[in-house]
Image (cartoon, grey):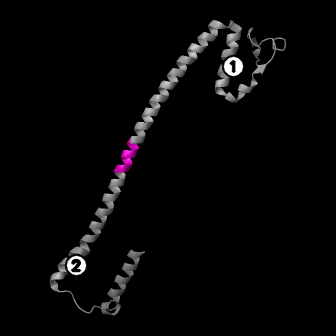
Amino acid sequence: GIFLCGLVLAILERTVDPQYLTPQRARLPPTWYAVVFWFGTNWPGVLLYVILSQVMEELAESRRLLEASKADADCLNAELLQQQHRLKMERSLAYGLIFNVFPRSVSASLIELFEQYSHDPEQLGTLHHTSKAEAHPMAGCDSLSSICLTPD
């Protein structure tokens, strides 16, 4: 907007008498012409330098924050890999314990149910507390407990 207004005024001053639009009572002394000319030609460069220096500072700050975020992400990724390794180890130990403690048919059912529930935890409510007489013939029942796992 300001640039367009300045352009229109410059065109008007060139086409109409400059004294009519912007009357000047006194002229500058000849020694000031060089100073005004220097200032008029250099202020856009100075303004551009100030703007670019601030932009460069913001860019450097953004890069620093990006590097910090990347370091945090790498740290979290390493922690996630450690936890996945730990989970794999605990899962193999749990499966080994189940295979050693329960009969083969019961342990296979338990492992299958664990895998099923690990993919869909909302199905956890399908465990039925029943007596041995009500248990499904293929269900794995612990003889010491009344919790039976019935296949769906």
Of marks 1 and 2, the one in the foreground = 1
Q: Amino acid at mark 2?
A: Val
Q: Quadrant of the C terminus?
A: top right
Q: State the separation of the CA atoms marked 1 and 2.
A: 87 Å
Q: Please state the horizontal and vertical placement of residue 6, each as a whole percent of the image.
A: 37, 79
Give the image quarter of residue 121.
top right
Identify which residue, 94 or 48, lies in the foreground. 94
- Can residue 1 be seen in the rendering of this structure? yes
On the image, numbered disc 2 is attached to which residue? 36
Q: Which residues are magenta?
A: 60-67
Label disc, if present, on residue 29 of the rendered structure:
none
Per the image, label 2 sits on a secondary structure element best described as helix
- Can residue 152 be seen in the rendering of this structure? no
Q: Is residue 141 within the magenta segment? A: no
Q: Please state the horizontal and vertical placement of residue 103, each as a whole percent of the image.
A: 69, 6
Identify which residue, 90 or 22, lies in the foreground. 90
Q: Residue at x 59, y 14 (%)?
A: 94
Q: Residue at x 34, y 50 (%)?
A: 60
Q: Please state the horizontal and vertical placement of residue 44, each as a whole percent of the image.
A: 29, 69
Q: Please state the horizontal and vertical placement of residue 145, each as a whole percent of the image.
A: 74, 12
The majority secondary structure of the magenta stretch comes to: helix
Give the image quarter of residue 108.
top right
- Outermost residue toward the left? 31
Residue count near mark 1 (Cα–Cα under 10 Å), binned few <14, some 14–19, many ≥20: some
Identify the mark nearer the N-term, 1 or 2. Answer: 2
Q: Residue at x 22, y 89 (%)?
A: 27
Is residue 97 left or right of 52 when viewed as pictured? Answer: right
Q: Amino acid at mark 1?
A: Leu
Q: Residue at x 22, y 77 (%)?
A: 37
On the image, numbered disc 1 is attached to which residue? 113
Per the image, label 1 sits on a secondary structure element best described as helix
Residue count near mark 2 (Cα–Cα under 10 Å), binned few <14, some 14–19, many ≥20: few
